[in-house]
Every structure is written in structure tokens, then in C-alpha cells.
Image (spheres, rainbow, N blue to C red):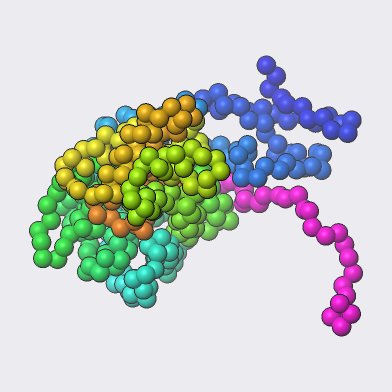
Amino acid sequence: MSDKATLEYNGEKYEFPVIKGSEDELAIDIKTLRGVSGMTTIDPGYKNTGSCESAITFLDGEKGILRYRGYSIEELADKADFLEVAYLLIFGELPNSEQLAAFHTDIKAESMVDEEMKKILDGFPKSAHPMGVLSSLTSALIAFNPTSVNVSSEKDMYEAIVRILAKFPVLVAWTMRKKKGLPLDYGDDTLGYVENIHKMMFKKPHQEYKKNDIVINALDQLLILHADHEQNCSTSTVRIVGSSHAGLFASLSAGISALWGPLHGGANQAVLEMLQAIEDDGGDTKKYMAKAKDKSDPFRLMGFGHRVYKNFDPRAKIIKKAADEVLADLGIDDPILAIAKGLEKEALEDEYFVKRKLYPNVDFYSGIIYRALGIPTEMFTVMFALGRLPGWIAQWREMRLRNEPIGRPRQVYIGENSRPFVAVAER
């Protein structure tokens, strides 16, 4: 097989190298295309365009494969905790016990957030969407950490990474507690990373915090499953903002804003809003399954199928079990969750959905779990951001260490040709 691809246009031929990834993916390297031919490519949504080479995450949508640094998502969700996976994504290898302990100790040492951040939080009304609040608070961290990260210094990089991993969960917890009218909480240094997140979010001032292992395990798995997902919209945003040499916090804030959209991180919120609408309409799941199959009906079944996975979402297989365990343990009698389980059962058995491989995806099950835990619907995407934080950091770090060029896509102009200016009195 040739290691070059040939483009022929208007009697001219141009050759471009073909590169192969470690999983045998092939790509045509067109870096010189415009220089040698005067042409560019056009690829709306960049569905056929590789923006970078990356050693972080491998995804095969046709086969339902997801791996972080070569480790299968199934093994990581079963055998590792979120902090181990964060270390793996960011630094490339799983930590040994000493490295993990030091990582956690260093994170705990940076977990305090400047008290003046509370004034910024107080400026938001309760009605503010938590994603807007979180994006603003993350960006505001820059004011309290004004020096830019020296990417050539391993020490500076490590300290910046530890700082955001420490402070981000506090911002997440404060965002939810503000929404629910609860006093702000800093958590507990004696707890594990995910346990502490849970406590900061849920502890009531007049009650002792009690750990629930089933809930903590489900939350741990959810964060792991969302930790990275290759070059999606928010990750690409973090990389392209960072390519201008914007700082880590600014790049992460941009990623949060990109994640907010209903076609991306907002999908799990959309699932619950759909379930609520079905419940408000009488809760007839069969009626809505029929609407979903009717091409002339504008209704869309949220949380089923995936734009990347053409088979079952491997993350959904893992988290389905956790969702069942959480619902059984908490014994919640919630009509919304009953509707969700009814839709799941029908979709897994209905020939229309099975034939098209429209299985419940990770957004469907994550929404169920978050609802069962008492997390407000508007906070679901915030929880997604909390899980995705290590992936964003890893991608930003990789991009900066490789000194990738600033992102600057081209376009094909389709506007007016050159025309003279006409004075306002003559228009």
C-alpha cells in the first residue's frame, strides 16, 4: 500500500503523505495543501478532519471501544478510582501507591478557595443556570492566580493541575448549594476525592454526613466514564483556546461553555426534561415510543443512540448496572424514574430500536442516577464537567507540550463580490 495519497485537479497532481496511528487509523496529511495547490478543504463540523495527533484516548464507534491511554474503559471503571484515572489521563501512566497518595495530599493542600470568590457567587441570582455560574467562577480563578503557567517547567505545570483539581469540585459544590439555598461547604480532608465531593454537595448543616458506598461507587464510575472522549466539541474548544497560549483556567472555562449546549453535555439534562414532559402528559411510554418512530412527528427520544457509537455505548453498559444498584438501594418511588425504566425496557425489546441500534446511552443512565441522588436537573451538565475536567487538562497539557500551532481554520467565502460604497443619502 502506498504511503502517499494523490489529489488530481485541473491537470495537476499533488501528493500528500499518509500517516498511520497506533490503532492503524489512516489519515492524509494535508498541511501543505494550500501552499502547493492554492486550495483548502471544506468539512462542516470537522467530521472528517483530524485536528491533532493525540496519545490520550482511543475511540472506535463502530466496535464500541473506548480506551484511556490503552486501558479499556471497562477495566478502569471496575478496578480504578477517579483520581487514579485522572492521573493516568494527565500524566500518561497509572500512579503507584506513593504517587497516588502524594497526588491526593497535594490536591487537598490546594482545596481552599479565596473567600472573595463567595462575593462573585453571591452576585448571581438563584435562577442563574449552574453552567453559567461554573464557567464564570472558573474564569474568575484567574484573578486569584494571575501568573501564567510556565509550560516548560514540570513543577509549574504540576502545581497548576493540582490547583484546579482541588478547587473545581469546591466550585461545583458551591454552585449546587447556591441553587438549593444551602450554606457553602469546604468538605473534609479525611475523605477520598469523590467522597469529599459528595459530602461538599450534600451535607446538611444540622446532620452528620454518612457515606453510602453504593452511591459513592456510582458517582466514581460516572466521573470515570465522562473523563475524556477524544476530540469532541468541548475538548476541541479547550485545545483551540489553549493554542493561543491562553492559560489553563481560561481554556477550561471555554470548554465548560462549549459543554453547556444540549447537543453536547446538556444531553443528560434534556433526557430528564423529556421524561418530565412525558410524565406531565400522563406517563404513557408506548405513546411516546410510537411518536419517536413516526418520522413526521417532531418528537425525539433523548438519551438513545449516539452520534459516535454506531452500536451500544460501552459506557452505558457499565453505568446501567450502577443505576440499577442505586435505585434499588435508595428505594425511591419517583414516577419520572419509573418512566425512564419503562422506556429503557421497551427500547431494548422493540424491533425498531434494536434494528437501528438505538440503545440507551450514557446520558440516559447518568440522568437517572443524578435524579435519584437529588441533584437538580440544571446541575447534570455541571456533573459532566466535573468528570471531564481531567480529560480537558490532559488535552491542554498535551497540546502545549507539543507546542502545537494556533488553531486557525479556513473558510470558503460565499458573500458579495467587491462593490462600491454608496452614501446614505443615495441608498
Region in magenta: 398-427
Query: Dividing the image into 4 quarters, which one contains the N terminus?
Result: top right
- By secondary structure, the bulk of the magenta-drawn segment is best described as loop
Residue 49 relative to residue 195: left or right: right
Residue 180 relative to residue 231: left or right: left
Quarter-of-image position of residue 359: top left
Q: Which of 370 and 155 is in front in this view?
A: 370
Residue 321: percent from left, percent from top:
26, 34
Residue located at (81% from left, 39% from top)? 36
Residue 48: percent from left, percent from top:
63, 36
Relative to 347, residue 231 above or below: below
Is 422 contained in the magenta span?
Answer: yes
Q: Is residue 65 at least partly visible in the picture? A: no
Residue 346 relative to residue 220: left or right: right
| Residue positioned most to the bottom | 425
Is 49 contained in the magenta span?
Answer: no
Residue 414: percent from left, percent from top:
78, 53
Residue located at (22% from left, 62% from top)? 186
Residue 349: percent from left, percent from top:
37, 28
